[in-house]
Image: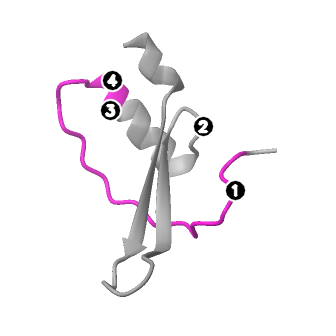
């Protein structure tokens, strides 16, 4: 369980058009380096490992740098 503390999960939503490339339209980052709602959701999931914890998230632009300076 303690190894999950250092995990980061990046979920990317893509626009699948069937012709050519699928373009990313947004992403959500969950994990140890997340912020605000995403970090609270990650903490709730770690606190209840065998219980589903549902949460809506707002997509960020795919090219946004999620690392803090």
Q: Nearer the viewer, mark 1 or mark 2?
A: 1
The crowd level at tag 4 (other Cα within 10 Å; few <14, some 14-19, many 20+) is few
Mark 2 and mark 4: Cα distance apart in space: 17 Å
10, above or below 26, in the image: above
Mark 4 and mark 1: Cα distance apart in space: 27 Å
Q: Which residue is mark 2?
A: 33
Q: Which residue is mark 1?
A: 65
Q: Of callouts 1 and 2, which one flags the residue occurring earlier in the amino acid sequence? A: 2
**Residue at figure coordinates x 74%, y 45% from the top left:** 68
Q: Of callouts 2 and 4, which one flags the residue occurring earlier in the amino acid sequence? A: 2
7, above or below 13, in the image: above
Mark 1 and mark 2: Cα distance apart in space: 12 Å
Q: In the rendering, which numbered label is found on residue 47? A: 4
**Residue at figure coordinates x 47%, y 47% from the top left:** 38
69, above or below 16, in the image: above
Q: Label the magenta part by its dominant secondary structure.
A: loop
Instruction: Tell me the SS state at disc 4.
Output: helix
Q: Position of residue 26 (x, y in %)?
A: 49, 69
Mark 1 and mark 3: Cα distance apart in space: 24 Å
Determine whether label 1 and label 3 are within 8 Å by CB.
Answer: no
Q: In the rendering, which numbered label is found on residue 10? A: none
Region in magenta: 45-67
Mark 3 and mark 4: Cα distance apart in space: 5 Å
The crowd level at tag 2 (other Cα within 10 Å; few <14, some 14-19, many 20+) is some
Q: Of callouts 4 and 1, which one flags the residue occurring earlier in the amino acid sequence? A: 4
């Amino acid at each position: 369980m303690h190894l999950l503390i250092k995990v980061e999960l990046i979920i990317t939503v893509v626009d699948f058009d069937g012709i050519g490339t699928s373009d990313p339209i947004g992403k959500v980052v969950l994990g140890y380096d997340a912020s605000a709602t995403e970090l609270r959701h990650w903490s709730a999931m770690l606190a209840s490992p065998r219980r589903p914890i549902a949460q809506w998230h707002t997509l960020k632009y795919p090219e946004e740098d999620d690392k803090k300076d």
